[in-house]
Amino acid sequence: MTAVEADALDQEQGEGREVKKEEKRIESSQAAIEATARVIEATLGKSKAFRKVEERLYVVRQGSAYVMIVIVPADRRRAIVRLAAQVVTGIEMTGELALRLLRLNTRLRFGAFGYQKEGKVVTLCHSVLGGETLDPEELVAALEDMAMLADEYDDKLVKAGGGHRMQDLLEDEAAASLRSQVWDAGTEWDE
């Protein structure tokens, strides 16, 4: 076996160990994950803005913004509820705009704006402790603030630095899908 092959094998085994660790972590916190999901679904389930996407993943729409709710395992007894909104993508982040967001963060009750260089994305994120201790009122208060902030600031950020709101991206994707279906169907009449 060459050194390159040995390195590749070590990397593959390391990745396998990481996957197994994550699986064990999820398994050991399964009760907390399930308790968290029950509280989220009971608290938000009747809202027309709420939708379950898949296990441990939900979405709430507010105007032109979407807030994702993700249940993440923390330890054997706990889970974390992460609220995250991709506010704008493709924005031109300047030092001045970054400072404005940092100053705004100091005044927010819940969440904080962040920036991901890849995709030029402004995010709004917040986490609360899940499991049996998840407080429905705290969840709703944080979610309402996050959704309203994302909806308010997506337009302001696009105006300040360009880019696209989440709603714009979804509409563009839907239009592209529709165009694709129309073109794939052909223009000839079936006889």
Image (cartoon, rainbow, N blue to C red):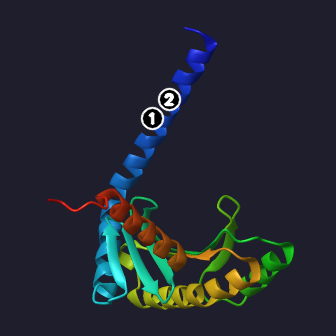
Answer yes or no: is residue 30 visible: yes
Q: Position of residue 127 (x, y in %)?
A: 53, 74
Looking at the image, residue 9 lies above or below residue 14: above
Q: Which residue is drawn at the image coordinates 60% and 81% (left, top)?
A: 111
**Residue 114, numbered circle:** none
State the SS at label 2.
helix
| Residue closest to the far top | 1
Going by the numbered disc 1, the residue's amino acid type is Gly
User: Distance between the Cα atoms at labels 1 and 2?
Assistant: 6 Å
State the residue in front, 1 or 35.
1
Q: Nearer the viewer, residue 158 or 188?
A: 188
The three-letter amino acid code for the residue at tag 2 is: Glu
Q: Is residue 115 left or right of residue 103?
A: left
Q: Residue furthest right?
A: 96
How many numbered badges does the structure rendering display? 2
Side of 37 where 88 appears, left or right: right
Q: Relative to 105, is 179 on the left or the right?
A: left
> Which quadrant holds the N terminus?
top right
Residue 105 falls in image quadrant:
bottom right
**Can you tell which mark lies on residue 16?**
1
Depth check, front residue: 3 or 135 = 3
Q: Is residue 78 visible?
A: no
Q: Residues within 10 Å of mark 2 (few under 14, many from 20)?
A: few
Secondary structure of residue under mark 1: helix
Circles 1 and 2: CB atoms closer than 8 Å: yes
- Quadrant in the rendering for residue 61: bottom left
- Give the residue at mark 2: 12
Left or right: where 157 falls relative to 23: right
